[in-house]
Image (cartoon, rainbow, N blue to C red):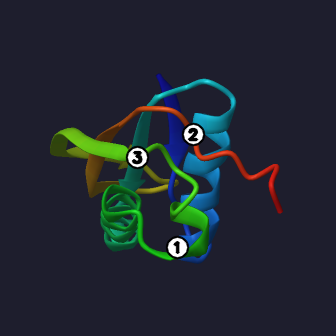
Amino acid sequence: MRTIYVGRKPVHAYVAAVLRAMQDGDRDVELVARGNSMRTAIDTAEICRRRNGNIAGNLPPEMFNRGVEIGTEEIEMEDSVRVLSYVKIHLEGIGEMPDDSEE
């Protein structure tokens, strides 16, 4: 399973990362995000699952959400400990990738 860490980039950058992972043969992908990036991870997963847009349209015909894990973790800072929420979203692509060699 390939892990994609979601941060501050736009959603389409992470959708493209999921597509690249699937094209490389990794049909199981885990999106991991903490704090404010959780919304971006959820949006990415939903765009991939629904295959919305030009990039996501090249994903396998069936995209499934195989599970979501949520929790909190403590991050040690210089003089304190910060508690951050996280989300892990497991996506699986099933079926043959669309052939884009016809373009």
Q: Residue at x 58, y 36 (%)?
A: 22
- Residue 64 placement: quadrant: top left
For the residue marked with disc 3, what is the amino acid?
Pro
The residue to which callout 1 is attached is 11
At mark 3, the secondary structure is loop
Q: How many marks?
A: 3
Distance in Å between CA atoms under marks 1 and 3: 20 Å
At mark 2, the secondary structure is loop
* In the foreground, 33 or 49: 49
**Tag 2–tag 1 contact (CB < 8 Å):** no
In this rendering, the answer to whether 3 lies above or below 13 is above
Q: Report the quarter where the C terminus lies.
A: bottom right
For the residue marked with disc 2, what is the amino acid?
Met
Q: Position of residue 18 (x, y in %)?
A: 55, 48
At mark 1, the secondary structure is helix
Q: Position of residue 29 (x, y in %)?
A: 44, 35
In this rendering, the answer to whether 30 lies above or below 103 is above
For the residue marked with disc 1, what is the amino acid?
Val
Mark in the foreground, 1 or 3: 3
The mark nearer the N terminus, 2 or 1, is 1
Is the residue marked by circle 1 packed among few (<14), some (14-19), or many (20+) residues within 10 Å? Answer: some
* In the foreground, 55 or 33: 55
The residue to which callout 3 is attached is 61
The residue to which callout 2 is attached is 97
